[in-house]
Image (cartoon, helix red, strand yellow):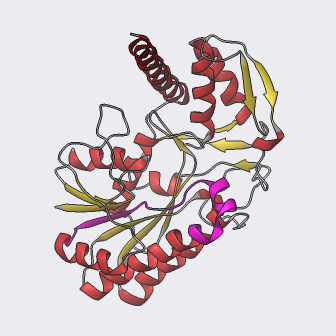
Amino acid sequence: MRAFVTGLTGFVGPHLARHLAARGFEILGLGLRQRQSAQPNSLPADVSLIGADIRDYADLLRILKEVRPDHVYHLAAISNVVTSMADPRTTYDINVGGTVNLFEALRELGLRPRIVHVSTAHVYRSMQGGALDERSPVSLLTPYAASKFMSEAVAMQSVEGYGFQTVIVRPFNHIGPGQPTGFVCSDFARQIAAIRLGQAEPVLRVGNLAPVRDFSDVRDVVEAYWIAAVHGEPGEVYNVSSGHPFSIQEIVSKLCALAEVDPLVEVDPDKFRPVETLRLYGDSSKIQALGWKPRFAMEQTLKEILDYWLVTLAGSSNQDSSAALYSRS
């Protein structure tokens, strides 16, 4: 069995690759070339990484003709909200155009694998009370949300028009060790780790702490993608969420408690988003009915994120010290 993963070298891709490899899949995918290491976001050694751009249709067609996958997991996207606001053109080009390329290449080749199309919970409208389910109203505040909703339409049309076996997942915020900066938990953990190590002054610079989010461990999320691929109904949409809302303020408090630091919290207006969904947490009962259940507690995941940054920053500091010593010798 072969699995083809787009966005293989993003935050989720390596976690998904390990998950699929444990189930006996041969894994191939698109992504940026990376230096391999023992970090949690590194690819397993036996995964075939193809350094191609999903916007290059001819290249994608050639690759899929050779791979002929049994499963396809479409992760490739501009997934940072702030980046999408700053560069809508590239966001639509990759998120919508790349999706069209993928489905059109599969159609042209006559391939009908099981497909998991990864969208986002950011397509939902903020609600004051209650969890969001798959029937909740849509509100497209950002190019990221709008492009993902458009790509959902492409995925849905593949089922209705061409008989594809495509399921759509809408993950809420997912976090874990190895997540890059630019995402709230990793950003805070990196700052707090630097304070704990004495590499930064005891000041935590934050944006808006009021929004409420639903955070899942990335390892739970990739398990949900697998469940959707195997048991999901083509044409259906499935939320992937913990169902437990946390304010950003609570995340800050939990990370500071884990690190045993008490920094001055300084609000930086430049860190506020131009538009913000204030309350976003989900009802995942639909995918749980297929056999999925979150396993990782929030505190465990936050501790692993913090530990990741403590180790990473301590190692970087040691390398810098060695380099400085060498330059003086």
Q: Position of residue 98 (x, y in %)?
A: 45, 73
Q: Is residue 171 magenta?
A: no
In terms of image quadrants, where is residue 54?
Answer: bottom left
Q: Nearer the viewer, residue 229 or 44?
A: 44
In terms of image quadrants, where is residue 318?
Answer: top left
Q: Nearer the viewer, residue 160 or 26?
A: 26
Q: Position of residue 175 (x, y in %)?
A: 52, 39
Q: Position of residue 141 (x, y in %)?
A: 73, 64
Q: Is residue 206 above or below residue 72?
A: above
Tell me if residue 190 can be seen: yes
Q: Is residue 35 above or below residue 303?
A: below
Q: Residue placed at 55% from the left, 56% from the top?
A: 79
Give, as a single range, the part of the protein colored magenta.
68-91
Which quarter of the image is occupied by the N terminus?
A: bottom left
Total marks placed:
0
Q: Residue placed at 29% from the left, 44% from the top?
A: 43
Residue with the most extreme front position:
329
Q: Is residue 50 above or below residue 187?
A: below
Q: Position of residue 114 (x, y in %)?
A: 30, 69
Tell me if residue 155 can be seen: no
Q: Nearer the viewer, residue 43 or 128?
A: 43
Which quarter of the image is occupied by the C terminus?
A: top left
Q: Residue placed at 50% from the left, 28% from the top?
A: 305
In terms of image quadrants, where is residue 67?
Answer: bottom left
323 to the left or right of 49: right
Q: Is residue 233 above or below residue 103?
A: above
